[in-house]
Image: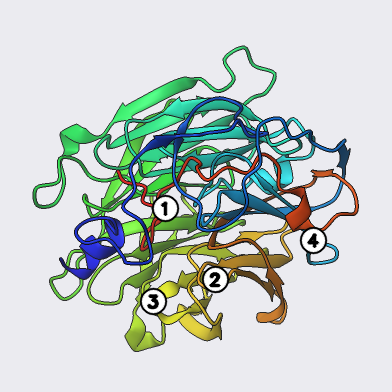
Amino acid sequence: MDRSDQRLYPNAGERSSSRPNLSRRTLLAGSAAVGTAVAAGCLEGGTESGPDVEAPPEAVVERPTMYVFNTGDGTVSLIDVETNTEVERRAIGLTASFPSNQFSPELTTAPEDPLWLNVDDGVRAVSAGPLEQQAAVETGSGANWQEQTPDGGHVVVSAREPAHRQFRIDADRDSETFGEVTGEIDRRPEGGRGDNDGPGPCDVTIHPDGEYAYVPDLFGDTLTVVEIEAFEITAQIDVERRNGVAPEPWMGTAAPDGDRLLVEHNDGTTGSESIWDVSDPAEPVELDRLTTDEGLGGGPLTSEIGPDSETGYVFTPETNDVSVVDIEAGRVDRRIDLGGSAFVGSWDPDRTTLYVPVQTTGEVAVIDNENRTIVDTIPVGPQPYGVTAAKVRIETGGESPSERIEHLTDEYETTYCIGDCACGHEL
């Protein structure tokens, strides 16, 4: 098995001795979020409480909050942005690796506003306040990525193999079709590299004008532009091979000012990062490509772009750091040592501070954008992976987070994690 296979299919072949051989099972006790039987994963440690445990009274507070999904036990840690402390941890019957976080933190201002998550074989909407499930869409794939449009009206989904599809979901809470699929593109006729039966749409990012979505195609070696309103492909750019190696684009992030786009590649032995001009949103043009020879960390997976649109933060888990990219200069400015592997990050609602779950240490690193340094670390639950933000949260009182875990069972719905899986989730 080569490096690419190990990262894409970490469950293939022999299981790690630290993880049990798992299968899809049923949730034993209803959680605050789900309340019904669902497909599940596992819990490594923790205590069990029955379904008759009475939850403490809850109130909604308007406080900027980070939601960190701990893939090791199915809990979500709520971090207060003003104090950088974990103020809540609860089991919600599921976990997520790539929650929508490009525009959602600014849109989630009321307790009923949804957090859009990739869970099990599809996409879920979970209310930011009580963390209750509002909608669920099955995509036919275990590997899903979704992003909400700037106006909050739609969610665009990339469902990788075996579905090879794009979905558009109604995200308007006042709409009669909220949570329903309103557009679909079958990408399978395009085919894919080798014996892949489709281009492998992997990740999705949306231009800030809200008109176009960009989809890196892992097996198609293309960057696809989708017009969101018509929900059709308007352009498809062949990504250039370097040194005869397939480029394997798989993740991407559009800058807030709409001029640049970062794309992560799974090519070669260490991966690469490309910078694109999207000032004409329908016609992306590649400007630069960075590798470890230019100082990039190993295995670039995802990225976030600072509020000034000048600085890119590329999560490079193979070297346990974040590569900071000067986007205009097309160079690596520095690398921030995390002391462990991190795969994603998210800005707080004001887009001043970047929160990075470090899965291998059970902490969240807090990076100040102005100084581009770690200013704090916050202990959370086991194996934190996905993170997003909202302007509201539930407040339950003065107990410690560990005392407030509700309806904790030893099973929960899992999510697809590149390079590592949430308790054995498979495509």
Q: Residue under label 2, please give it.
A: 313
Distance from disc 3 to disc 2, alpha carbons, whole Å, reads: 15 Å
Distance from disc 4 to disc 2, alpha carbons, whole Å, reads: 19 Å
Q: Position of residue 175 (x, y in %)?
A: 64, 16
Taking the spot 25% from the left edge, 34% from the top edge, the residue there is 187
Distance from disc 1 to disc 3, alpha carbons, whole Å, reads: 20 Å
Q: Residue under label 1, please give it.
A: 423
Mark 2: amino acid? Tyr
Taking the spot 37% from the left edge, 58% from the top edge, the residue there is 418
Q: Residue under label 3, please give it.
A: 318
Distance from disc 4 to disc 1, alpha carbons, whole Å, reads: 29 Å
Q: Position of residue 135 (x, y in %)?
A: 57, 25
Q: Nearer the viewer's eye, disc 3 or disc 2?
A: 3
Q: Residues within 10 Å of mark 1 (few under 14, many from 20)?
A: many
Taking the spot 40% from the left edge, 36% from the top edge, the residue there is 25
Q: Residue under label 4, please give it.
A: 81
Q: In the rendered image, is residue 411 in sight?
A: yes
Q: Secondary structure at mark 4?
A: loop
Q: Is residue 396 left or right of residue 125?
A: right
Q: Secondary structure at mark 1?
A: loop
Distance from disc 4 to disc 3, alpha carbons, whole Å, reads: 28 Å
Comes first in the chain, label 3 or label 2: 2
Q: Residues within 10 Å of mark 4 (few under 14, many from 20)?
A: many
Comes first in the chain, label 4 or label 2: 4
Q: Secondary structure at mark 3?
A: helix
